[in-house]
Image (spheres, rainbow, N blue to C red):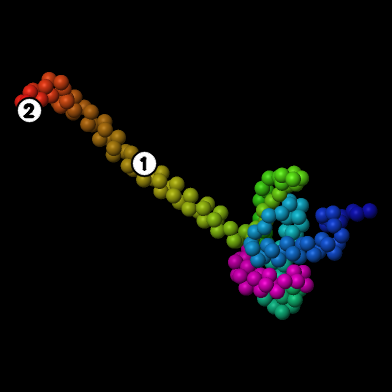
Amino acid sequence: MRHGKKVNHLGRTSSHRKAMLSNMASSLLLHKRINTTLAKGKALRQYVEPLITKGKEDTTHNRRVVFSYLQNKEAVTELFREISQKVAGRPGGYTRIIKTGRRLGDSAEMCMIELVDYNELLLNAGKAKKTVRRSRRSTAKKQIEPSTVEAIVAPKETPAQPPLDTPETAAPETENAE
């Protein structure tokens, strides 16, 4: 019986699964974002988040433990140099899974898994939109109020003056020109 065993086997042998997750984790750490199936993405999240937590403390032992999982020197140095600096204040939840629809060939659910602190477009766009909206609303209200007051006052004064472009005044000017 497999009571309480939560490992998703992903239809692979254990050696194939370990090699695949190791390669995917290295790619995620090097490229900061990868596209994969939803099941592989969820398995990768469980695999890589403890490694990122170990990367916060730069010791020889932690480097060797992480290297035993990744088998990629460039990914290990990237984790301990750059990624650990960005996630230093975060107590977990280093990855984000975004569903991207279904694959055409076999209709498998696809997702994009990325490191949370590296999506600067999403982080900056949310902050910029909020500040821009607030400033537009406040200036728009201030500009509308004086113009509406002038528009209400101006029409009351203008009907007393005769219109300038009437046919009677335009006709004598053309006769003088001939």
Q: Which residue is drawn at 26% across and 33% down?
A: 151
Q: Is the magenta stretch mostly helix, strand or loop?
A: helix
Q: Quadrant of the C terminus?
A: top left
Q: Is 103 in front, or is 164? A: 103
Q: Does 121 appear in magenta?
A: no
Residue 159, position in %: x, y?
Answer: 19, 24
Residue 162, position in %: x, y?
Answer: 14, 24
The image's mark for residue 177 is 2
Q: Find the residue positioned furthest to the top.
A: 168
Residue 43, position in %: x, y?
Answer: 76, 57
Q: In this view, does 60 lie above or below 47?
A: below
Q: Does 79 appear in magenta?
A: yes
Question: What amino acid type should be assigned to the residue bearing mark 1?
Answer: Lys
**Residue 160 visible within the image:** no
Q: Residue at x 43, y 47 (%)?
A: 134
Lower sequence index among marks 2 and 1: 1
Residue 150, position in %: x, y?
Answer: 25, 35
**Residue 14 visible within the image:** yes
Q: Mark 1 — residue?
A: 141
Q: Is residue 152 above or below residue 24?
A: above
Q: Which residue is drawn at 75% across and 71% down?
A: 71
